[in-house]
Amino acid sequence: MNDFHRPTVSVHKFSSCDGCQLAILNLGEALLDLVQQLDIRHFAEAGLLDELAPVEIALVEVSLSTSADIERIKHIREVSRFLVTIGACATAGGLQALRNLSASGEWLGQIYASPEYIASLDQVRSVREVVRVDAEIWGCPVDRKAVLQALAALSRGVLPLDEDRPLCMECKRRGLPCVAVSQGQPCLGPITRQGCGALCPGLGRGCYGCYGPAEQAEPAVLLQAAGQWRDGGLVVKENFRGFYSHIEPFKGRNERSGET
């Protein structure tokens, strides 16, 4: 008799581009191993439908944009032992949260011919603003290895490590020349958390912050230093308004700048 317990898992999507779910589906051979180790109850992108199923681990790729989203995430929280946000949308509101920088409702009339039919919240919210979150996997999209490591840890009942040190650490480990120093390129590496493997610096371009703020990030200091790079101040300011404009310290920087 096989008494091996496979932890139950669900993967949920709300307002997002599906990129983080596709990162999981693109695991290749590792995905075949994963489905042998886990009992996946709901994953619409993969054709498995049981959204109400109680599970041990729920992965959510969401930004909360409507009242219905709020109710859904509360239910998922109730039926899940561990709730894990995956990607910039879930951890910080993502690009959808850019509308939070505008006056309430202003953007609706610019996009929709009949904005009165759009039932959106005044502000896009991240998941942790509404319910308790047990772990966060950052990135846009998430790194596949990070998802596997998190699932392995949670399957054993422990929380995954939060790798929130600056991206510069990964550049050092890879032996990459600093693109800011050697090429004068604007780079958010000093204030962005590691996890992507220094993908952009490895290709000779500056980091633009898609993995979120690192521990003790100081955007104001980076902005001051950006004056030595061509168009550095403009590029850095634009990146503050990217994937993580809705959370500190980027949100605070946007507010203090008085820009809309």
Image (cartoon, rainbow, N blue to C red):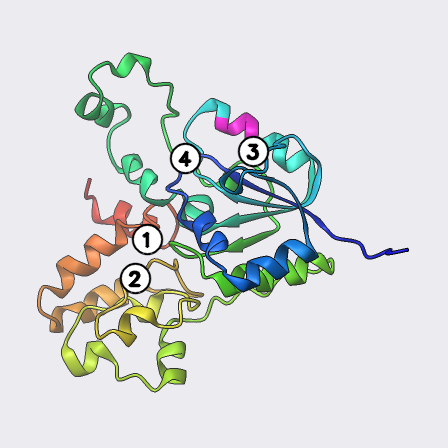
Residue at the spot of label 1: 250
Q: Is residue 57 at least partly visible in the picture?
A: yes
Of the residues shown, which amino acid type is indicated by label 3?
Answer: Ile
Residue 15, compared with residue 95, is above or below; it is above
Residue range in magenta is 69-73
Percent position of residue 235, x then y: 16, 59
Which percent across, then down, holds residue 61? 48, 43
Q: Is residue 45 left or right of residue 93?
A: right
- Identify the residue under disc 3: 73
In the image, residue 174 above or below residue 107 = below
Gap in angstroms between the C-alphas marked 1 and 2: 7 Å
Give the residue type that dot 1 points to.
Answer: Phe
Please indicate, yes or no, whether residue 128 appears anywhere in the rendered image.
no
Residue 15, picture quadrant: top left
Marks 1/4 in contact by CB < 8 Å: the verdict is no
- The amino acid marked with disc number 2 is Pro
Q: Which residue is mark 2?
A: 219
Q: Earlier in the sequence, mark 1 or mark 4?
A: 4
Disc nearer the start of the sequence (4/3): 4
Q: CA distance from mark 1 to mark 3?
A: 25 Å
Q: CA distance from mark 4 to mark 2?
A: 28 Å
Q: Of label 1 and label 3, which has the lower sequence position? A: 3
Residue at the spot of label 4 = 15
Asked if residue 158 lies in the magenta stretch, the reply is: no
Q: Is residue 52 left or right of residue 218?
A: right
The residues tagged by marks 3 and 2 sit, at their Cα atoms, a distance apart of 31 Å
